[in-house]
Image: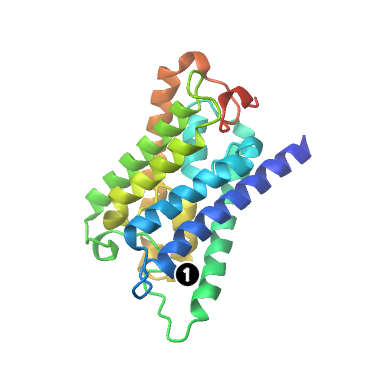
Amino acid sequence: MESDMSRRVIAEFFGTLWLVLGGCGAAVLAAGFPNLGIGFLGVAFAFGLTVLTMAYAVGHISGGHFNPAVTIGLWSAGRCANKHVIPYIIAQVIAAIIAAAILWIIASSQPGWLPGRFAANGYGDLSPGKYGLGGCFLTEAVMTFFFLFVIIGTTSRGAAAGFAGIPIGLALTLIHLISIPVTNTSVNPARSTGPALFAGGEYIGQLWLFWVAPIIGAVIAGLLARWMYEQEAIVGTVVVEERRVTP
């Protein structure tokens, strides 16, 4: 039993590490690269691809959450056991911080590099489009709500078996296409925490929003899904295919 939990936690660690390294790495290292920058579109796809690839790589081990809001949302939906919630979140946050540290070391090795926002999230003056607190809070809550709604729906009985990773990855891509100009897109408290600790200052001060809003959106989605999929609610961990749910 202990080894099973260890495998789950390690899977969540590496999945989250890849998400932050790939998504935030695309933003920090490649988004604005002279002449060849991938821009917002490239960053959006980078985040989607990290979730898509890791969903199939380790989703069958841990459920492929890689995000504290997803873990809490699935718990509220009856799809994640109580005993997994805290260990998963700890692993996710540690992984995000380590990924941000790796990115910092890589990026700072370039002569003349300036950290800027370092892929951190923010509102007001720290929002890419200077959107206010209310708009940013609503954006994060609504985007996370729909992310969880897609995750739960595509992993439910009756959905196409074994293909959930694709719509989930595409949903995260779409979310970034919508909300990068607003908050630089979080929908993931761990993803926000790592870069904020290195960007420092006001980014740390605004980090609360990128925990509170995604969790609220995720819990609402989870509770709605618990009602919609009442006959399928299982206290376990969702993986790419619900037939593999482990109580």
Could you tell me which residue is drawn at 37 percent across and 74 percent down? 116
List the residue tagged with mark 1. 198
In the image, farthest residue toward the front: 35
Residue 239 falls left or right of residue 118: right
Residue 3 percent coordinates (x, y): 78, 40
Residue 97 percent coordinates (x, y): 55, 61
On screen, residue 70 above or below 208: above
Using the rendered view, name the quadrant where residue 17 is placed: bottom right
Residue 237 falls left or right of residue 198: right
- Quick one: quadrant of the C terminus? top right
Q: What colour scheme was applied to this rendering of the protein?
A: rainbow
Looking at this view, is 55 or 83 the one in front?
55
Residue 233 falls left or right of residue 143: right
Q: What secondary structure is found at the residue carrying circle 1?
A: helix
Residue 115 percent coordinates (x, y): 41, 75
On screen, residue 30 above or below 134: below
Could you tell me which residue is drawn at 59 percent across and 31 percent down? 237
Could you tell me which residue is drawn at 63 percent across and 26 percent down? 244
Mark 1 surroundings within 10 Å by alpha-carbon count, few (fewer than 14), some (14 through 19), many (20 or more): many
Looking at this view, is 60 or 143 the one in front?
60
- Quick one: quadrant of the N terminus? top right
In the rendered image, is residue 93 in sight? Answer: no
User: What residue type is disc 1 on?
Assistant: Phe
On screen, residue 111 above or below 115: below
Residue 143 percent coordinates (x, y): 33, 42
Residue 33 falls left or right of residue 191: left
Looking at this view, is 41 or 58 the one in front?
41
Could you tell me which residue is drawn at 50 percent across and 61 percent down? 194
Q: How many marks?
A: 1
In the rendered image, is residue 55 in sight? Answer: yes
